[in-house]
Amino acid sequence: MSDQQTSPSNQGQQSQQGQQNNQGQLAQERQLAENQVDQAIDQLAGKVPGGAQYAQKAKDEADKILNNLEGELENRLGNAGGLLGGLFGGHNDQQGKK
């Protein structure tokens, strides 16, 4: 095998590394979104009399929504990575688990 060819096991490792990079980027995007939402909630709460007492509950609810979105995206990325990994000889540890 030449240096330019990639073995199936290396392709599976590359797929896994791609998934980890995607998850790292996803975590950064999630944090950015959370910061922006929290800031918007704080600004709005500051404009409404007594709004500060509801700010934390609003942030908690927004956090739940962001968690749901993040989980759904991770599932979709994981499924795509599993399919690609399967095509290139890798395997998905999540396969068969729901």
Image (cartoon, rainbow, N blue to C red):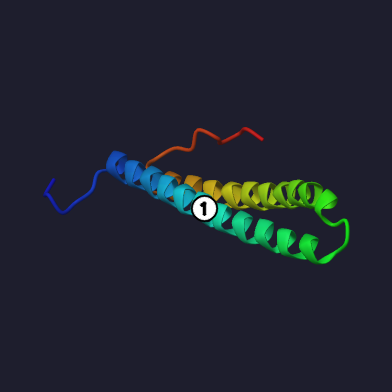
Outermost residue, left side = 2
Outermost residue, front side = 49
Residue at the image position 32 percent from the left and 46 percent from the top: 11
The image position of residue 66, as x and y in percent, is 68, 52
Name which residue type carries label 1: Leu
Q: Which residue is nearer to you in this view: 79 or 30?
A: 30
Q: Circle 1 is placed at which residue position?
A: 26
Quadrant into which the C terminus falls: top right
Residue 65 position (above or below residue 94): below
Locate residue 4 relative to residue 57 in the image: left or right. Answer: left
Give the total of numbered labels: 1
Outermost residue, right side = 49
Residues packed near mark 1 inside 10 Å, few (<14), some (14 to 19) or many (20 plus): some
Residue 67 position (above or below residue 47): above
Residue at the image position 39 percent from the left and 50 percent from the top: 18
Locate residue 81 relative to residue 30 in the image: left or right. Answer: left
The image position of residue 72, as x and y in percent, is 65, 50
Quadrant into which the N terminus falls: top left
Residue at the image position 39 percent from the left and 40 percent from the top: 90
The image position of residue 34, as x and y in percent, is 63, 54
Quarter occupied by residue 94: top right
The image position of residue 87, as x and y in percent, is 42, 49
Q: Which residue is nearer to you in this view: 77 or 31?
A: 31
Residue at the image position 67 percent from the left and 59 percent from the top: 37
SS for callout 1:
helix
